[in-house]
Amino acid sequence: MKLSYEDKVQIYELRKQGISLKRLSEKYGINLSNIRYLIRLIDRYGIESIKKGKNRYYFPELKQEIIDKVLLEGCSQRSVSLEFALPSSGMLPNWLAQYQHDSYHRFLKSKGIHASMSRKGNSPDNGMMEFFFGILKSEMFYGYEKMFQSLEDLEKTIVNYIDYYDYYNNKRIKVKLKELSPVQYRTKSFT
C-alpha cells in the first residue's frame, strides 16, 4: 500500500505519542521495518524529507557513490539509505539489483575478477573466513584502532598477524598433540 504524505506524518505523530510499531503496521498495512525506516528518516532529516516531489532524479554519479558505499565499503543498505535520505528503504536494493547486471560486471571484469552467481550464497560458504576475521579483529584490532598511524601500518600488522597465524597452526609442534602441528593433528586419522 502506498502511503500519502499525510499518512506518513500521521504515522510519525502516532509513534511519537507512544503507539506501538506493531499497531501502526496493522493499521496502515505496511511492515515494521518500513515504519522504522520512516521514523528514522524523519528524525534525522525532518518531516520535509518525506514530501514527495515530482519524480526525483538521482544523477548516475550519486547513484554510483551510494552503491559503492554498500559494495566496496561494506556499509549496510539501511544505513546508506538513511545517510542519503532515500525516500524508501526499498530503493537501494532495487538499484543494487539493476547494478549487478551490466556495469557491475564491467567493473569486475576491469579488475580481472570473474563473478560467479550460479547459486544463492549461504552462511556455510564463508563461515571459516568469518571465523578467521572475527579472531583477527578481536586479537589485533579492537582496542588498538588508534595505534595505527596509516593504512600501511594496519596492512603491515595484518600481514604479520597472518604469518604468525600460519606459523601457529601449521608449523608449531606441540608435544601434547603427538609432536604434530594443530592442523596436522586435526587432519591425521589415528588408527
Image (spheres, rainbow, N blue to C red):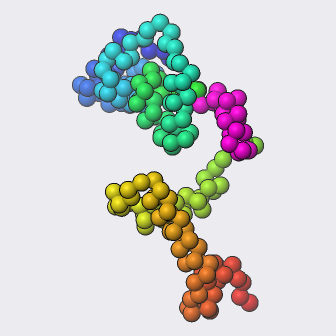
Q: Predominant secondary structure in magenta? A: helix
Q: Which residues are magenta?
A: 96-115
Residue at the top extreme, as displayed? 54
- Using the image, determine if residue 54 lies above or below residue 139: above
Q: Residue at x 67, y 30 (%)?
A: 103
Q: Is residue 21 above or below residue 139?
A: above
| Magenta residue check for 111 | yes
180 or 60, nearer to the observer: 60
How many marks overall? Answer: 0
On screen, residue 119 versus residue 98, left or right, reads right
Give coordinates of residue 92: x percent, y percent: 53, 28
Residue 123, position as x, y percentages in the image: 60, 53
Q: Residue furthest left?
A: 17
Dividing the picture into quarters, in which one does residue 72 lie? Answer: top right
Q: Is residue 172 left or right of residue 45?
A: right
Viewport quadrant of the C terminus: bottom right
**Is residue 74 shown left or right of residue 46?**
right
Q: Is residue 71 visible?
A: yes
Residue 187 quadrant: bottom right
Residue 24 magenta: no
Picture coordinates of residue 99, whole percent (x, y)? 63, 29
Q: Is residue 39 visible?
A: no
Image coords of residue 184 (percent x, y): 66, 81
Residue at the image point whose x is 65% and y is 55% from the top? 125
| Viewer-nearest residue: 174 or 61 | 61
Name the image quarter holding residue 25.
top left
Name the residue nearer the viewer: 91 or 6: 91
Residue at 72% across, 39% down: 109
Q: Answer above or below: position of 164 versus 10.
A: below
